[in-house]
Image (tube, rainbow, N blue to C red):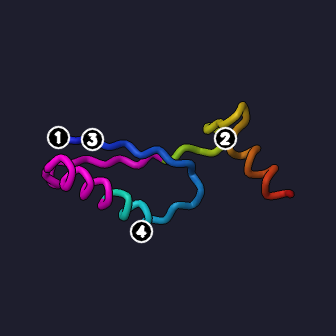
Amino acid sequence: MPYVKIQIAKTGVTAEQKAELIRGATDLLHRVLDKPPSSTYVVIEEIDTDNWGVGGESLTVRRARTSST
């Protein structure tokens, strides 16, 4: 029973995009490892950009800085 956890920054990802990620991860495990889709679990966790840091600062700060230049 494969379990896939996908963590992404909360930035307006659509339901359609999430569905595509779920289908894609399920298909990949089926093709590569012959895991049955019926027992493959995919969980998408959206992390607030205030809670995701890169290079010593949050994504919120980094994005605000790059969008203002």
Q: Which mark is residue 50?
A: 2
The residue identified by callout 3 is: 3
Residue type at numbered disc 1:
Met
Query: Magenta stretch: dominant SS?
Result: helix
- Label 1 – label 3 distance at C-alpha: 7 Å
Residue type at numbered disc 3:
Tyr
The residue identified by callout 1 is: 1
CB within 8 Å, label 4 to label 1: no
The tag earlier along the polypeptide, 3 or 4, is 3
The residue shown at (57%, 51%) is 10
Give how far across and how far down residue 9 sits, in percent. Answer: 56, 48
- The 10 Å Cα crowd at callout 2, few under 14, some 14 to 19, many 20 or more, is few
CB within 8 Å, label 3 to label 4: no
Element on which disc 4 rests: helix
Q: Which mark is residue 44?
A: none
On screen, residue 53 versus residue 31, left or right, reads right
Residue with the most extreme front position:
32
**In magenta segment, residue 39:** yes
- Label 4 – label 1 distance at C-alpha: 25 Å
- Label 3 – label 4 distance at C-alpha: 21 Å
The residue identified by callout 4 is: 16
The tag earlier along the polypeptide, 2 or 3, is 3
**In magenta segment, residue 57:** no
Of circles 2 and 3, which is in front? 3
Task: Write down the region rendered in magenta.
Answer: 23-45
On screen, residue 12 versus residue 4, left or right, reads right
CB within 8 Å, label 1 to label 3: yes
